[in-house]
Image (spheres, grey):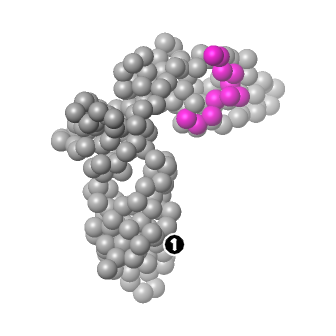
Amino acid sequence: MSLGVNELKPKTFLIYEGQPYAVLETHHLKMQQRRPTVQVKMRNVVNGKTLERNFAQSDVFEEADIERQKVKFLYNHKDQYWFSYEDESSKRFLLTEELIGEATKFLKANTVLDAIEYNGVIINIELPVKMEFKVLEAPPAIRGDTAQGGVKQVKIETGAYLNVPLFINQDDIIRINTETGQYVERVEKGK
């Protein structure tokens, strides 16, 4: 199936210069005296590299034949991340930190997520948009400490650091948007 420039939206997969890419962002640019173009930020789903390109309204792309499959994240060792197929837990595979990118901050053991398959090979993973994490470390909120907009940095169970509102404490369970890396809400107050 072919895709026109206006059909390129985040999470769309396309073939560009013979490689599969996932669209991350698109911006329509209108310049005086010139035809409008679409600026596309996309990530190569095989090697993880990000590109930004401007395309004309007339450009057409082939849609990448991507399949999704449920897998479970098992553990990581150094920069290797191990997964198993949900229906066959003995069948395991690994992906590297370089390939997975920012998503590694939100990988926790036994999380079920989507594996992205291209030409019969798993090439990357896609996290659920919202996930819950336990706060391991949270500095105390200091009265009058709202100069930075009332946020502080906490450490979650995966080891990642995030900005959260001042009222979040150690042992709280918080919901995070894994696409933006931003705090959404507190799910449960710590004991």
Closest to the observer, 13 or 155? 13
Residue extending farthest right:
33
> Residue 14: x percent and y percent?
55, 22
In the rendered image, the residue lying farthest to the top is 18
Residue 4 lies in magenta, yes or no?
Answer: yes
Q: Position of residue 186 (x, y in %)?
A: 45, 70
Depth check, front residue: 98 or 13 = 13
Who's the residue at 33% across and 35% down the image? 87
Query: What residue is at 29 percent from the left and 55 percent from the top?
Result: 158
- Assign a secondary structure to mark 1: loop
**Left or right: 139 with respect to 44?**
left
The N terminus appears in which quarter of the rendering? Answer: top right
Q: Quadrant of residue 151?
A: bottom left
Q: Is residue 162 above or below residue 144?
A: above
**Residue at the image point whose x is 49% and y is 24% from the top:** 66
Q: Name the residue nearer the viewer: 137 or 174.
A: 174
Q: Residues within 10 Å of mark 1 (few under 14, many from 20)?
A: few
Name the outermost residue toward the bottom. 143
Task: State left or right for residue 46 relative to residue 67.
Answer: left
Residue stretch rendered in magenta on the structure? 1-11
Residue type (three-letter) at the residue carrying disc 1: Gly
Q: Is residue 52 visible?
A: no
Q: Quadrant of the C terminus?
A: bottom left
Residue 149 visible within the image: yes
Image-quadrant location for residue 131? bottom left
Residue 144 lies within the magenta run: no
Identity of the residue drawn at 66% across and 21% down: 3
Q: Residue 88 sits in which quadrant? A: top left
Q: Is residue 36 left or right of residue 159?
A: right
Most distant residue in the left direction: 77
Q: Position of residue 84 (x, y in %)?
A: 28, 36
Residue at which label 1 appears: 149
